[in-house]
Amino acid sequence: MRQLQEICGDDNVFWRAEDLLVWEYDAGFDRHPPSAVAVPGSTAEVAAVVKAAHDAGTAIVPRGAGTGLSGGTIACAGAIVVSTARLRRIVAIDAAARMAVVEPGVPNVAVSAAAREVGLFFAPDPASQRISTIGGNVGTNAGGPHALRYGSMVNHVLGIEMVLPNGEIARFGGTAADLPGYDCVPLIVGSEGTLGIITKIWLRLLPLPEDIRTFVAIFPDIDRGARAASAIIAGGVVPAAMEMLDNVTIGTLNAAFDVHLPPDAGSLLLVEIEGLHEETEDWAASIERLLRKNGATDVRSAASAAERELLWKARKLGYAALARIKPNNYLHDAVVPRTRMPEVLKQVNAIAERYGYVIANMFHIGDGNLHPVLLFDARTEPIDRVMEASAEILKVAIDAGGALTGEHGIGLEKNHFMPWVFTAEDLDAMRRARDSFDPDGTMNPGKIFPGGEACADIPTERTKRVLAEGMWV
Amino acid sequence: MRSPLLDTEGLNQCIHCGLCLEACPTYRITRLETESPRGRLHLMSAIASARIDPRESDAAVLHLDRCLACRACEAVCPSGVPYGELIEEARADIARARGTPPLGRLALWSVSRPRVLGALAALLALADRTGLRAGARRILPPRLRRLDALAPPPGRPAYQPVAVEAPRASVALLLGCVMRVSYGDVHTATARVLARLATRVVEVADQGCCGALHAHAGDNAEAVRLAKRNVAAFERSGAEAILANAAGCGAFLKSYAHLLEGDPEWAQRAAAVASRVRDINEYLAVAADGATFGELAMRVTYQDPCHLAHAQGIRAEPRALLGRVHGLELIEMADADVCCGSAGYYNLAQPDYADRLLEEKIDAILATRPDAVVTANPGCMLQLAAGLRARGKSIPVLHVVEVLERAMRSA
């Protein structure tokens, strides 16, 4: 502790039980306080903290803004939390190279804000972007609505500076294209803090589109909305973003934001296209035609930039607004093949109905990334039952040929479900890749990989493990 | 010890999404979860569920004390967590368990006693005139020097009611505590601007301090006592609108309904009075619809008072009013709605954090190269003036109504 204080300063190290309480959570369910917290102010301080922990044999959990939904930043096994929140400099915006160099604690939205001045933007836009950090976005390979056209973080990270588990500082990738040898950058993106602590990131920036058009299409039910979304993709135009909102969500957004969406709509598609004026003109006509042909009762487009921004604000903050219905919710992140979307949605809603939960759907329908949200009150409704319903939802998605996560990461939330999609050999190969960075297993222990005991004293973690191992046949 | 005061429903509303973090002034300067709204709500929950005993935990109490209660978090919270109410409840709970610190007790005792406050102001004015204050400044210990730097300006003219012939409307004006003693001329300016709109300010004899400072500091009983006195006084006035030109006071008057909701005798009366309360900017923006306010060639920047922007959602109105002054140029500063660090007597209780916030605020102000800084709350006026003075700048800090009144005079 003395050592940590010497490195980071007294004000940036915490060890009292009541201080540690505020690092026991993220935005998900699992709770566990770390044994200490250090909030270093520079790469050198991060390296010194990691080295000190390594020498003492103490495990480390990296953390950004703590907006994660999969327990990736929850510290167990006596680990200390190392927060990157104070590393928040935008080191450079290089217009000529179309690149930003940032520290990990920079909030996602700040990158686009800084790049806008030179006519560029940063594409990944997770709903949490006002607060979630670039470091965390890299860790979970975050996406967001516009991942439909632009891909997720892995497509936008050019280089990474990382403190390795032994305290050494290493650099991967960078500004020059076509580096020879193994490309470690895509391996680190999505590694959820199990390989080291990222201290600097080189990001790809894109030119701001000449024209943006945003449509709101109203449907009488979810099924017709889902079919219209499939028709648009099949029609050959790939929108920049395509989101579905169901009736429960629409009501919540109306209550929380001044959006005035039709309250009795069964579902709504928010479709955005970006490009040159000549392109968007053609695309707009064809998308509107497809929407109407597939059952849209009304299609309107945002009349101004302000209206467009309000729609996206409501969409992106909508998840938190659901607390107005019930104080707790479980937000899922499964991905299914687009062609199976309508039937999977039906099954997911049927599960919620069978368990008696209100369900809200607000998700990236364009790329098949489902976000069903089960609403409940943890004071009266047992969490174990919510998790059981959740496991069933996950199983439906996997049975349809889907994936465990689109952008939130595996963390503690879905680690025990990994064998549902990966064979023992797959998992073993992944473990060997991790071991080449972290042979002692001190970086973010208990995450991603199934079956470990590191976090077994968290009750929700045990529940999920029992479900994962019991339900798979 | 389980807390009877904390609203567990309100606390339960927080889903830990973290969207409040970037809005919080103390998180912005520290980047520490302990100094964030989400962290503080979690600590309040821990107190409510007896995981933390506020009598034992200095650390938890310190993190809650460092909250400015600016309510920027509440304004951005999609889940609707009533943070402002919760932090007051938590402070009342802590005050009950630990007592209020002596400095705070003294400040609170004096503001609810107009005569004491008046005597203090007179003393200060005397010390100013005799040169005693300048002399004392050299030998005072830092803490008292700070108090001196932030003391309300002595010697500003007292409030002079303005006669209005054939008024079209009558309103009441909250005279308050610090405003009444130190910013009487802002009240006069308010009355003059209203007179221009043929609106008369009626006298409301028994009104007093609104009680906001007491509630923010956890002295709920005194806040309730003061609230009841004002409810009774404003009821008797019969005025159709009750105006406040101090954002903090206006926000608190509007919350009287909540403060007294548990008291069957007062709940309805408080709700009726609260529903008639308007901030002066809010009132003028409607009442002066279409009117212009003369001319004032000046380059200004506007600081959003927290309890105007966040607590009352009033951001566009003061800017619109300034926009109706011919020749006045409004340059927006960066982060105009981030707290300046004044926050009641926060600048005395938490000097380190208050100074860090003030430094950033003064930087943002100076970057706009203004002739004057405009705001709408006495606490902000004091703090900004002290900050500018410390940097050796003679840029005046004006209330919105002062700008309007000056412009009217020049027309």
Image: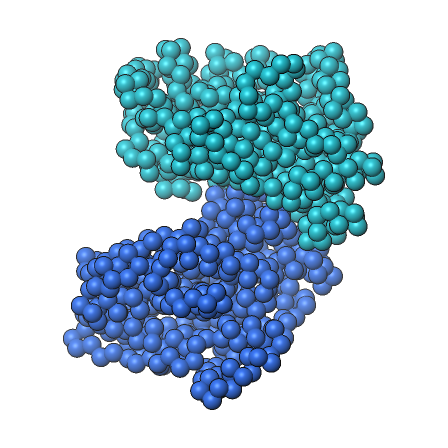
Question: In the current view of this chain or complex, which residue is farthest to the left?
Answer: B166
Query: Looking at the image, how many numbered discs can be counted on the residues?
Result: 0
Residue B393 visible, this angle = yes
Q: Quadrant of the C terminus of chain A?
A: top right
User: Could you tell me residue A340's position as x and y percent?
Assistant: 50, 13
| Residue at 35% in and 63% down | B372
Q: Left or right: B377 with respect to A137? A: left
Q: Is residue A425 above or below residue B50?
A: above
Q: Is residue A295 above or below residue B255?
A: above
Q: Left or right: A281 with respect to B68? A: left
In this orientation, which residue lies closer to the viewer: A327 or B338?
B338
In this orientation, which residue lies closer to the viewer: B292 or B140?
B140
Say which chain is blue. Answer: B
| Residue at 35% in and 66% down | B399
User: Could you tell me residue A218's position as x and y percent?
Assistant: 34, 26
User: Could you tell me residue B126's position as x and y percent?
Assistant: 46, 88
Say which chain is cyan. Answer: A
| Residue at 65% in and 14% down | A181
